[in-house]
Image (spheres, rainbow, N blue to C red):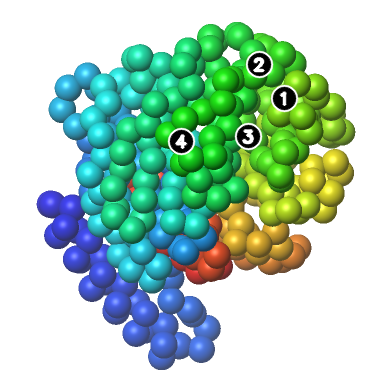
Amino acid sequence: MGIARLRSLLVIALGALALSACNSTTQSAPLAGVPSASIEVPLTSVGCTTTDTCLALGASSATSGPTTLGEDRSAHGTWHPVRVPAAASARLDELACARTACLAGGAQLSGDLLWRYRSATHAVTVLDPPPGGQGVRALACASDTACVLVDVTSVVGAARLSWTSDAGATWTRPVAIPWSAHLTVTGVACRSLTCVVVATSGTHVRLEETSDAGLTWTPLAVSAQWRTMNDLHCWHSSCVALVSGETSSLVRSRDFAATWTALALSSRTRAIACVHPTRCVAVGQSASGAGMVTTITERRVHDLALVYAPSALFDTACGTSECAAIGASTLVALAP
């Protein structure tokens, strides 16, 4: 069965479910997932602009046939294919969006992979990354033109920090992050000239801050129980992140990552995103192996009914009022 045909049947089925829900006082309409445009290329990352356009990208390790995939969705709209550059043996790991544009980063045979997406044209173009990189590990954008990038030069080498003020057309000379050697960088966030970078060894988390463009670093306190920290997002002084240890937790900071409070989540949570520090979405895998979506308001956690999410959801992103989540071949949109 073709993807378009399957999507049409899902729309009809979900319409019937919604009508049933309208006639019921005990059941609300379920959240609808839809299949991605291709099962040959798995989705790997998703991002949303502050104008609520969301972009999902995928990459395959294949050296022939389809190697990359893109779909986007305007606010309150439906998903549509986006033409993306071909890249053999590519990996797409990061998406950072601002008002109307996103940067996508990963790795390819030649080193760093870096793309720019513009929601006005639905176009994805190739950018020249900082020279010498072997893979983009983290991205963050304060605006459509001002972004920060963390990449690596070898498997065990220290990561590097670079900035752009012209939408990725040019980058500052990379500055090494010496304390990150032998660790995996999992996030970066900045406010003005101050940035925090988080990395993990798989058994502990290290979080450090720089206020002089990476010349010096100051360690920030983290729990000894944390093994990983992912999905770090900050708005001015407020930050959120997903941490894992013996359990998974959404952690929040009101002082730009200096101190944290934790809210326990399901151990099956894979990713979090927020429209506001107190209004978030968590995604993962249910006990049956299907996709799971949870909304979080302040300290209230609510699991949503989800139709068509045959496997785990592993990435999510939010704009100002809408969010999106992806599995390997599934797209979900919601307003938390």
Mark 4 to mark 3 CA distance (whole Å): 19 Å
Residue at mark 2? 176
Q: Is residue 207 left or right of residue 151?
A: right
The answer, for residue 16, to whether it is visible in the render is yes
Mark 4 to mark 2 CA distance (whole Å): 19 Å
Mark 3 vs mark 1: which is more N-terminal?
A: 3
Residue 324: name its quadrant: bottom left
Relative to 208, say whether 43 is above or below.
Answer: below
Relative to 334, say whether 41 is above or below.
Answer: above
| Closer to us: 203 or 286 | 203
| Closer to us: 327 or 53 | 53
The mark found on residue 168 in the picture is: 4
Rendering coords of residue 167 (x, y %): 46, 41
Mark 3 to mark 1 CA distance (whole Å): 15 Å
Q: Residue at x 19, y 32 (%)?
A: 66
Residue at mark 1? 214
| Closer to us: 184 or 223 | 184
Q: Residue at x 60, y 61 (%)?
A: 275
Residue at mark 3? 187
Q: Secondary structure at mark 1?
A: loop
Query: Closer to the camera: disc 3 or disc 2?
Result: 2
Q: Are marks 4 and 2 in contact (CB under 8 Å)?
A: no
Three-letter amino acid code at disc 4?
Gly
Residue 271: name its quadrant: top right
Q: Are marks 1 and 2 in contact (CB under 8 Å)?
A: yes
Mark 1 to mark 2 CA distance (whole Å): 8 Å
Q: Is residue 67 left or right of residue 273?
A: left
The mark found on residue 12 in the picture is: none
